[in-house]
Amino acid sequence: MGKSQFLSSILFLLTHLIIFSIDSATSQCPIDFTYVETFPWDSTLCHEPADPECCQTLSSLFGMGLAKHLKEKSMFYLPDANSSSSCLSEFQNKLTTMSISQSFVHQCMNDSNELVIKPSSCAGIVTLQDWFEKVGPSSSLDSACRNFTGITQCGLCLDAGMRVTAQLTSLDPNSTKCFFFTVFYAAGIVNVFGPENRKTAACILGLPSKTTNSSKSLTRERLLKLVFGLLGSFIGVLGTIGFVIFYRNWSKKRKQETLHEEYVSGVKARVSPNTGAKWFQIAELLQATNGFSQWNMIGQGGYGVVYKGTLSDGTIVAVKQVLDLDSKGDEEFINEAEIISKIKHRNLLSLRGCCVTSDNLKGKGRYLVYDFMSNGSLYDHLFNYEANRHRKPLNWPQRKSIILDVARGLAYLHYGIKPAIYHRDIKATNILLDSNMKARVSDFGLAKQSTEGQSHLTTRVAGTYGYLAPEYALYGQLTEKSDVYSFGIVILEIMSGRKVLDTVSPSALLITDWAWTLMKSGKVEEIFQEYLREEGPRGVMERFVRVGILCAHVMVALRPTIADALKMLEGDIDIPRLPDRPLPLSHESFMSSLQNSISSSERSRGTSSIRSL
């Protein structure tokens, strides 16, 4: 009996030791942070008093470790919360040995969950194999970022990175980290020298390095001796050749500058001068955005990247860099600027200015400048508010005001301009909020001027899946009620806090089918987001939901105009009885046709757009 008890005790201890070992292993950090002490990064930025760029530098330094982790483990980011916390702790310990305060890590990287891999981070990508399935085994990134032997190679790498980021974002518009996935892939997988190479770290990761004055002086001394030795022998020949080359280059450059000045003058003349739109020089935008630094990037989409910038007079702006430069010339861009510069309304984001640069006469850079909206997008407040501890859920007065603001903005586009303008891409990310939480509709890059009194037929569907009216997505038939459908979707999102496409809920996939079912069964209160159920007047909130369902009806003829929808929302006219709905939009046959239509239109789309300011 004593021997049996002894053996049982041994087994008990061994079992607990194994469990303890497993728990310890799962909490270990898979990244070796030795490079923090060995890589020559500029640690002076984080010494007291800290430079404003300290947080950016620490993020880039940690990103070097994530790029190494991808190279070694074929996994983006970290596997779980324990590993994330452990890595932050080890990272902080390494910085402490370099006399850098622990407080900087807490200030700059205060949420360890941001380092944990999630399928929703970027188009469902978790592993390197997922990346290859989404992007392909080879892309422009693989050739542009392989090494930095040429002086222009870094710029080519960054351009390729933006294109791949746009490709990934188009697969899942709700993705938030595709840019960083691209950075880690370029630094850890593509570049032959790896993320710990100084050029790789500087170009791809944006990590500043120390200057090495002694080696630089030695190299300069040797170079000067060589140059002066050769110069003494060949000064006459070199002088003659240099003069000839200089003259030819000057002449060629002068001709190009003359032609480009004429070209730019033509573009400037196309933008209405009486609207207040300013023609910016590229030097102004470079200074405002710190050279279009990745740390100033505040938004991205399929056709462009948005940067926060500060003009010389202190004005904060949003600068949209258009990435789609493959279309013929700048005609599409000029047309876009023409349309936007004419529009002035308190609920529409007006154009502050634009810029076109050119190296070979047809444009290598296109930019649009807007007022900066300090409260971000409606999408952030509806679906990402938990990520910002200072942001609270929208209350009922704010939601009501936003819905009415959007309706007034659309009404102006449809009836305040001749010919009318159809937006074509009304969604939560294109509704921005100013400092007073007033809504402004943005992204007129997809706008289409109509022929008065007619619908518009197009073979290229522009917009976002889920928000597109069925007749537009399937047949390319565009009318003012196409915008009304998208507006109805936005109303339902605001009132319910539910995304247009809910892939998690076991109930109806589309918000329209879900809301319709609850309304018809007398469960309208279940549509309201939890925060609203005890806050707002039930009758008014129900009226808003009914208008949303009516606007998002499948049948075009049963939708109200945006003017009538606004009157219904304000209680000026009665809401008609909700008509029956045909086959649900989430039905398998409809979804298949819609997906095929969207996929084919995405392949043929070639217009530039203003995304997610």
Image (cartoon, helix red, strand yellow):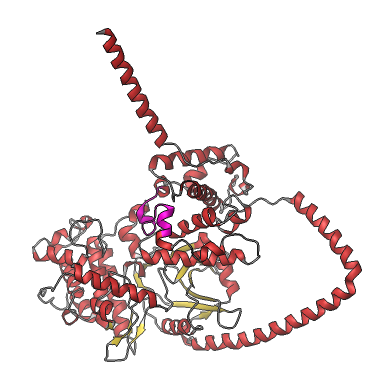
Q: Residue furthest right?
A: 233
| In this rendering, position of residue 487 left or right of residue 362 | left
As for residue 54 lying within the magenta part, the answer is: no
| In this rendering, position of residue 94 left or right of residue 514 | right
Q: Quadrant of residue 221?
A: bottom right
| In this rendering, position of residue 219 left or right of residue 500 | right
As for residue 121 lying within the magenta part, the answer is: yes
In the rendered view, tell whether residue 29 sits above or below residue 419. Answer: above
In the rendered view, tell whether residue 32 sits above or below residue 540. Answer: above
Residue 347 appears in view: no
In-front residue for pair 250/276: 250
In the rendered view, tell whether residue 76 sits above or below residue 575. Answer: above
Residue 480 appears in view: yes
Query: Residue 54: percent from the left, percent from the top?
Result: 56, 50
Q: Residue furthest front?
A: 137
Q: Residue furthest top?
A: 2
In-front residue for pair 109/171: 171
Report the label total.
0
Residue at x-position 63% and y-position 47%: 44
Q: Quadrant of residue 133?
A: bottom left
In the rendered view, tell whether residue 483 sits above or below residue 76. Answer: below
Q: Quadrant of the C terminus?
A: bottom left
Q: Quadrant of the N terminus?
A: top left
Residue at x-position 50% and y-position 64%: 161
Residue at x-position 21% and y-position 77%: 565
The part of the chain drawn in magenta is 116-132
Query: Residue 385: percent from the left, percent from the top?
Result: 34, 56
Query: Residue 147: percent from the left, percent from the top?
Result: 61, 59
Query: Residue 61: percent from the left, percent from the top?
Result: 55, 49
